Image (cartoon, helix red, strand yellow):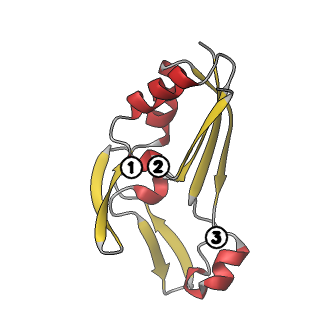
Amino acid sequence: MAGAFAVMVIEHVEDLEALFDEAARVVRRGGWFVVVSNHPAYTAPGAGPIYDMSDGEYLWRWGPYFERSRSHEPAGPATMVFHHRPLGDLLTAAAARGWMLDRMVERGLGQEAVRRDPTLAGQQHFPRLVGFRWHSAV
């Protein structure tokens, strides 16, 4: 296979190393693996926006960003398990399994998202999504 995608799933995978191993198994040498995910700054337990009433600015509460953790979050009538890991853990796990990073992109909220939900105004400078593109070196 020339490449594989994992979009909005990596934070639900408990065994991160197995994910990179499986991608390496199915992607040919020199092939690519693209991951798009919620940014780990966004998924740390207790992380979230804080409104500073003194000047109207939104700040970010980081929570225990450097600690791996698991949480159960509501998703409709059910709950989903989220696994938080800092960026360094993701990059190290990929490199240890023969994936070479080509590109990493971080994104905040776009203007369209804020237009649809005005309560998000002022939060555009927080990282929400992260994307990685690796190529197989093994």
Q: Real-space Cα distance between discs 1 and 2?
A: 5 Å
40 sits left or right of 121 in the view = left
Q: Real-space Cα distance between discs 3 and 1?
A: 25 Å
Q: Which mark is residue 124?
A: 3
Q: Secondary structure at mark 1?
A: helix
Residue that badge 2 annotates: 9
Q: Position of residue 136 (x, y in %)?
A: 63, 21
Q: Which mark is residue 12?
A: 1
Q: Which mark is residue 46?
A: none
**Residue at (65, 76) in percent of width and height:** 113
Where is 73 relative to 93, above or below?
below
Can I make out residue 33 in this image? Answer: no
The three-letter amino acid code for the residue at tag 2 is Val
Q: Are marks 1 and 2 in contact (CB under 8 Å)?
A: yes
Where is 42 relative to 54, above or below?
above
- In the foreground, 107 or 52: 107
Q: Position of residue 84 (x, y in %)?
A: 37, 49
Q: Position of residue 131 (x, y in %)?
A: 62, 46
- Of all residues, the one furthest to the top in this rendering is 138
Q: Which quadrant: the C terminus?
A: top right
